[in-house]
Each structure stands twice: as structure tokens, then as C-alpha cells.
Image: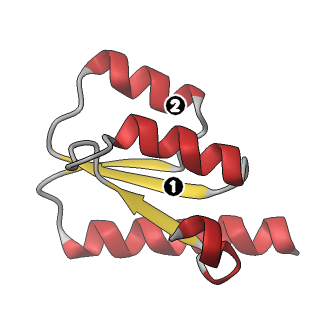
Amino acid sequence: IYREKRGAIDIVILDMLMPGMDGKKTLKHLKKINPGVCVIIASGYLPEEDTQELIEQDVFKLLRKPFKISDLKKTLDQAAVRLARKTG
């Protein structure tokens, strides 16, 4: 979907545990398509080694489930500010 509609997608919210392709593989594919993609990881399971790897891959934010809607809104607002600065 992202490959076809990347111009219409500003932010990707990605879980680490998904059927078919896990979050780490999905992130690598997204970064191949668009190295500047803004990704927020939302996961209840995130081992420390995965956290470090995600930081190195320039993930915008890590949200641990469960999270409050206010935390998600704050993260989305921060991501929107970052995107506005990039597109200037």
C-alpha cells in the first residue's frame, strides 16, 4: 500500500508483531521505498535490542502499548511539526 500511495501518506504507525511480515522487516521495506518516511512504532512487546535497532533506523517515536489517546495525539502532533519543517 505504501509503495502505491506514499504521496498521500504522511505518517506510518507500525506494530512489531504482525502476521506475514514483522515490524522490523516492514520498516526495512518502508525505508527502501522512502528513506525519510516518518514511522511511529506502537508495540506492547519491544525487547531492548530491538529498541536500539529501531533508534538506529531513525524511527520517529516508540509508543508502548497500552498507551493513552492523549499520548498518541501528542506524538502525531510532534510528527506533524517535524514533517512541516522538512517540507518547509
Front-lying residue, 81 or 14: 14
Disc nearer the start of the sequence (2/1): 1
Vertical side of 51 occupied by 76: above or below: below
- Residue at the right extreme, as displayed: 88
Question: Where's residue 33, x and y in %?
Answer: 69, 53
Q: Position of residue 62 (x, y in %)?
A: 37, 45
Whole-angstrom CA distance, mark 2 to mark 1, is 11 Å
Q: Residue at x 11, y 56 (%)?
A: 66
Three-letter amino acid code at disc 2? Ile
**Which residue corresponds to the image point at 51% horizontal and 31% vertical from the top-left?**
55
Q: Report x, y in % for residue 71.
A: 29, 66
Find numbered disc 1 in the image and state the secondary structure of the residue it sits on: strand
Circle 2: is it few (<14), some (14-19), or many (20+) Cα within 10 Å? few
| Disc 1: CA contacts within 10 A as few (<14), some (14-19) or many (>=20) | many
Image-quadrant location for residue 52: top left
Viewer-nearest residue: 20 or 51: 20
Residue at the disc numbered 1? 39
Q: Quarter holding the C terminus?
A: bottom right
**Mark 2 highlights which residue?**
55
Q: Amino acid at mark 1?
A: Val
